[in-house]
Amino acid sequence: MPRLGSSDLEVHPLALGGNTFGWTSDEAESHAVLDAFVEAGGDFVDTADAYSAWAPGNHGGESETIIGSWLKAGGASRRDAVVIGTKVSQHPDFAGLGAANVAAAADASLARLQTDRIDLYWAHFDDAETPLEETLGAFHALQEAGKVRHVGISNYSADRIREWISIVQREGWAMPVALQPHYNLVKRQPFERELAPLASAHELGVTPYWSLAAGFLTGKYRTRDDIAGQARSSSVEGYFSDEGLAVVAALDEIATAHDASIASVALAWLQHQPTVVAPIASARTLEQLPDLMAASSIRLGADELASLETASAAVPE
C-alpha cells in the first residue's frame, strides 16, 4: 500500500469520505458502508468536525460521531486497523485556527470519535486572521501531547504552504505530511500548476477531494434536468459544460473497454497521477462502494491516459 507522504502511515489507495455520514446516510447505513469498506481492504477514512453543519437540523460533528460509534463497536483492534483523518477550522463552535480554538476543537473531535488520537489532523481552510506561527504552534503542541500523529494542509495557497514549511523548518517542528486539494478530471488547476510541484518537493501525500466532481464524473448527470432536486445539485452545476461532458464521454469509452464504471476510471486516473496517494470519494449507500474500490485494480494504458489528458485539458479553468 502507498505511504502517505513522509509519514509512517501506509494507506489503501482510496480514502472513504465521511461527508455523507449524518447527512445523506443515517447511522446504520454509514456503519454498513464503513464495514464493507474495511472488508474490501480499505483503511483510510476522511472526515471533518464541520460535517455536516450545512444540513437542516445538524450542527456539525455528526460525521465524527457516527465514525466514533463505529470505532467503539469494533474495539481496539478496529481502531488500530484504520487511519482516521479529520479537520479543524469550520465547525460553528470552533471556527478559525487560533491556538486555543485548535486545542478545544481537537478535544471535541477526539470525544466524538471516541479515540485517544487523530492519525491525520488537517487545517481545513486557511485563517488569515490568525498568525500562521500561532496555528502551527498549536498543532505542534497536539503532536507533543500525543493527541495528533501527523498534520495535513487543505485549501491553502501555494504561498501559504511555502510559509508553513518555512516556519516548521525554522522552529524544528514536524513537517506536514499531506495535502488535500480540489482536484479531478474537470478541475485540474491550480493544483497541477501551483501545488503539485510543492507536494513533490516536500513529500506531501496528495488526497484530492471532490474526486468525482460531486458525482458529475460518475456519468449519471448528462443534462441539467438530471440534477434537479438532488442533494448536491448546486455543487454538480458548476461542472457542467460541453467540455466537461466530453470528458465524461471519454471516460465512458474507456470504462466500456475495461468492463468498469465511469466512476472507477475517473478515480483510477487520479491514482495514476504523480504525488496522488489516495483520492477521497464518498459512498452514500453500499451499492456505490464497489465502483470506488474497483479503481485501484484498473491499469490505464498510455493511449487511455492521453485521451483523458486531451479531453480534460479543454475544460475551462
Image (spheres, rainbow, N blue to C red):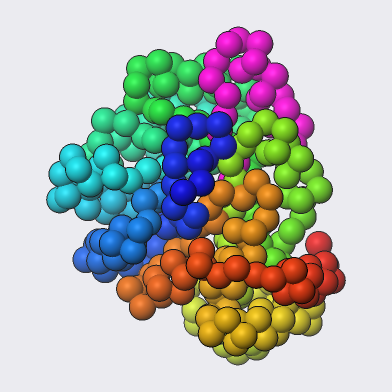
Q: Quadrant of residue 214?
A: bottom right
Q: Quadrant of residue 91?
A: top left
- Above or below residue 128? Residue 30 is below
Question: Is residue 224 visible in this depiction of the protein?
Answer: no
Residue 281 falls left or right of residue 284:
right
Badge count = 0
Report the magenta residues as a range.
158-180
The one nearer the camera, 53 or 192, is: 192
Please say whether residue 175 is one of the residues in the magenta stretch: yes
As drawn, the residue found furthest toward the top would be: 171
The location of residue 283, given as percent across then percent down, is 41, 68
Residue 242 falls left or right of residue 287:
right
* Quadrant, the C terminus: bottom right
Please say whether residue 156 is one of the residues in the magenta stretch: no
The one nearer the camera, 9 or 160, is: 9
Question: Is residue 61 visible in this depiction of the protein?
Answer: yes
The location of residue 316, given as percent across then percent down, is 83, 67
User: Looking at the image, which residue is at 53% across and 20% down?
Assistant: 174
The location of residue 166, given as percent across then percent down, is 70, 19
User: Looking at the image, which residue is at 55% across and 74% down?
Assistant: 263
User: Looking at the image, which residue is at 41% across and 28% down?
Assistant: 149
Residue 183 falls left or right of residue 102:
right
